[in-house]
Image (cartoon, grey):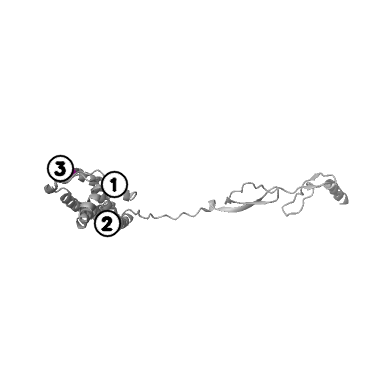
Amino acid sequence: MLLRVTVLTVVLLGLVAFSILLAKVTLTPSPASEDIVTSNLRPGRSLRQYAEDYTFLAACKQAGGNVLLGVPFGLLLPFLVPRRLRMISMTLLTAAVMVLVELVQGALVTGRAFDIDDVILNTSGALLGYFLLGRRISHSYHAHAHTPRAEAVEPEAEPKAAERKTPYRTKTKTGTTKTGTTKAGTPARGTTKAKEPVETGARTGSTRLPKARGSSGRPTAGVGQPGSGRALLDRLRRR
């Protein structure tokens, strides 16, 4: 914020000083040239006149003065225009200001007239100042003044134990295996509970029930065993 305020204050003071100089140079009456000066709406007409009718030093002074008069535009305006399309905005503003100055000259100031070549020379001076120095310093200013602050990024919370994923594998009909993940405590999709084995008779193809076992793990008599009643009668007879 301090940098922006300081730079903008210097730029505004520079524009005020330049405006006073511009008004003094362009809006000062010149009665001696009242009968000579004429309005020019054809680009290049005055430049051709400088080359043909003026001496070399006088031509350089006239044309170079108009070019130097536009250089401050290229140094100061880039600080005030947006970063996007900065050069185009600066060029259009310079041309608009100089057209206004030339119109005031031709309408109100004695000995001066509107000249389109002066507008072209002033705009060329603004572009020259922009490419020589204005682009660099304005780019540095905008880069430091408008850079957003880095926001603190909170670390992501670790997933809960119930939401952690565990791998699983399932078999398909073709014998290939599929892998995937599932949350802890939930069965994986596509899996089935294991069924008890079923014995099938080799000859008749009948189904046999599994042998019932007691708490000790041994098979219990009379439950699910064919011929268990006969064995019990044989034991009673022996006793």
**CA gap, disc 3 and disc 1:** 24 Å
Q: Amino acid at mark 1?
A: Leu
Could you tell me how many numbered marks the image carries? 3
Q: Residue at x 66, y 52 (%)?
A: 177
Q: Residue furthest left?
A: 31
Indicate which label's residue lies in the foreground, 2 or 1: 1
Q: Quadrant of residue 60?
A: bottom left
Measure the alpha-carbon separation of dots 2 and 1.
27 Å
Point out the stretch of residues depicted in magenta. Answer: 104-108
Q: What residue is pinned by disc 1? A: 92
Q: Is residue 107 magenta?
A: yes
Identity of the amino acid at label 2? Leu
Within 10 Å of disc 2 (Cα), the crowding (few <14, some 14-19, many 20+) is: few
| Category of crowding for the residue at label 1, using alpha-carbon neighbours closer than 10 angstroms: few (below 14), some (14–19), many (at least 20) | few
> Quadrant location of the N terminus?
bottom left
Q: Nearer the viewer, mark 3 or mark 2?
A: 3
**Secondary structure character of the magenta stretch overall:** helix
The residue type indicated by label 3 comes to: Leu
Residue 8 appears in the picture as rendered: no
Q: Which residue lies at the image location 58% right of the left edge and 53% below the top edge?
A: 166
**Residue 110 marker:** none
Q: Which residue is mark 3?
A: 108
Q: Secondary structure at mark 1?
A: helix
* N-term mark: 3 or 2: 2
Residue 92 falls inside the magenta stretch: no
